[in-house]
Image (cartoon, helix red, strand yellow):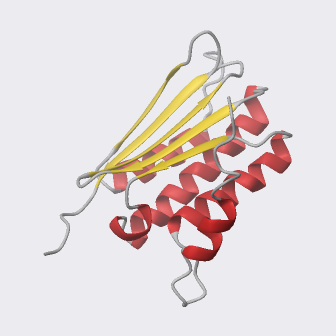
Amino acid sequence: MTSLIHCSSIYALHQHDDGSGEAGLQAQLIVEVERAGQILGFTPALRMTGLLDTRVPPEHAEHLVAVLREALSNVARHAGATAVEIAAEVTDTLLELRVIDNGRGIDPAVTRRSGVANVRHRAEQLGGTLTLSPHRPTGTVLEWTVPLPEAGP
């Protein structure tokens, strides 16, 4: 896997500050990925598609950043992964986050999954879904999808 954030990091961090002192959603995602990279020992690949900074409402953005943080934390603590791919995508109607790692996968013997429950709850609060599935040959795919409110005129 190649890291896709290096070329866009500086651009995103500078271009998406609206003057209020708060970074745009793309910049927030880049910061989370870079923080996780320090813990993981490698930088996850990040692909962002769509108008994340303008189409995603603040409440959805807050949830998305928290879900990414939790997903990367789970990879760091449990997966033993050597690579992670992240895709954040927004369309006219949906916001989706996909995190794929090449680690051990989810241990079926572990029944306590408070981090996953929190991520699921965040999806449900926004009328969305969380799907966890195996990634072949190893690892896990987390897909967090929520509907977006209709765009204004």
Q: Looking at the picture, does residue 20 appear above or below residue 37?
A: below
Q: Looking at the picture, does residue 139 appear above or below residue 137?
A: below
> Residue 138: percent from the left, percent from the top?
65, 14
Left or right, residue 52 beside residue 23:
left
Q: Looking at the picture, does residue 143 appear above or below residue 80?
A: below
The residue at the point 46 percent across, 64 percent down is 61
Depth order, front residue of 119/22: 22
| Residue occupying the far top of the picture | 137
Please identify the quadrant where the C terminus is shown.
bottom left
The residue at the point 56 percent across, 75 percent down is 15
| Residue occupying the far bottom of the picture | 20
The residue at the point 27 percent across, 58 percent down is 148
Left or right, residue 91 beside residue 77:
left
> Residue 102: percent from the left, percent from the top?
68, 22
> Residue 73: percent from the left, percent from the top?
71, 45
Depth order, front residue of 47/98: 47
Please identify the quadrant where the N terminus is shown.
top right
Left or right, residue 121 beside residue 12:
left
Q: Tell how many labels.
A: 0
> Residue 4: percent from the left, percent from the top?
64, 44
Depth order, front residue of 148/30: 30
The residue at the point 76 percent across, 43 percent down is 43
